Image (spheres, rainbow, N blue to C red):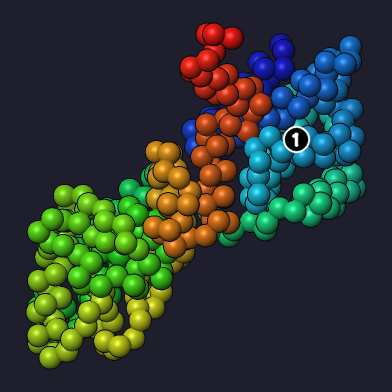
Amino acid sequence: MDFVDEIEEFLDMQKKENGEATTKTYRSKIYAFYEFVSLELRDTDVSYLFFLNRMDKDKLLQSVEHYVRAGNLKSRAAVDVYFSVLGNFYKYLSNKNGKTNDYFQDNIKKEEFKIEFEKKIKELHLRDSDTQEPIGREMAKKILEECDKLIDSIDIEKLLKKEKGVYSNYISSLIIKLVLLYGMKNEAIRKLKIRDYNDQLNDLVINNYRVRLPDGLAMQMKKYKEIRKSFLKKYEIKSDRLFFDDYDIEKELDNTKMYIVLKKVMGNMQAGGVAKYAIIQLLREGIPAYIISDFTNYKEDVLDYCQEQVDAERGLSLLSEKSRLLDSALRKNNLFDDM
């Protein structure tokens, strides 16, 4: 068995035990390690297993640095996963072959490596990991289903009577759908005015960007506009905000009112993970980061993190993948054939 076969067997095992999503996460990390080891093996006559088992902490840390440089990483989140993947890969080797690298088997050595890993993180000036990881597609679908259920089953009479939780669940569901689609930060949502929504053209102006609403959300927003009008009329109040607090018209919507529905589905109200899901979709479509930042109000650190996730999915932390991408672009140069 060669090194590639070994890695593919490891990934197959991960797929069986943890599912397809975990395998996708692991693939770019373990192949970045493969790339590093392969470069090191070019100048030696030893087998890959011998090299893996004899790697000292300095060589292991060089592999960490290779992964960071190759992926142009700015935050430590992906590097922490890389560290975890290495541990699981060596555990797989240990279960298969018995004795393996001391830095992943011996408790004292493991702790020693962990300390040096943290030093390397500081040396590379990586930002601390964001605690709000992006949600996955399955969670996004669950959130969407819950929001649609609450929106489409709204009891208008109960809402107008201010029965507990009715308005909050309704308004939260609409807002979460906007975050799930557009990746908006809280401040971008709070800035929305009723004039930003056009129920004739079914579009919404977000931070001066005019975007079209999907058909389902467009119909729900039309209904919301009528309910909003009835609510303001009943209580003889005025507001130019698209979304407002039903008990205090002057108060900005707080996080609880905006994201209470997330608590039901995810067990927390961390809307940042929902927004990152949307931002990742935009990056996958090639939208420049500066436009996404301007549109969503999320800054460089979040955009860098999301870009790292997209690059990892595409395998772009691997030098071989990046080389093929670069070579393909260079071949399209109008002077290429004349050279």
Residue 3 percent coordinates (x, y): 72, 17
Q: Which residue is at the front of the view, 130 or 113?
A: 130
Q: Which residue is at the front of the view, 58 or 110?
A: 58
Dot 1 amino acid type: His
Residue 29 percent coordinates (x, y): 65, 34
Please determine whether, in this image, residue 244 is positioned above or below residue 188. Answer: below
Q: Is residue 275 visible?
A: no
- The reply, left or right, for residue 51 in relation to residue 209 is right
Residue of label 1: 66
Residue 43 percent coordinates (x, y): 88, 16
Query: Measuring 22% from the left and 79% from the top, which residue is drawn there?
Result: 240
The quarter in which the C terminus is drawn is top right
Query: Measuring 9% from the left and 71% from the top, which residue is drawn there?
Result: 226
Query: Measuring 55% from the left and 37% from the top, which residue is drawn there?
Result: 311
Q: Is residue 326 visible?
A: yes
Please determine whether, in this image, residue 194 is positioned above or below residue 315. Answer: below
Q: What kind of element bears circle 1?
A: helix
Q: Residues within 10 Å of mark 1 (few under 14, many from 20)?
A: some
Residue 255: name its quadrant. bottom left
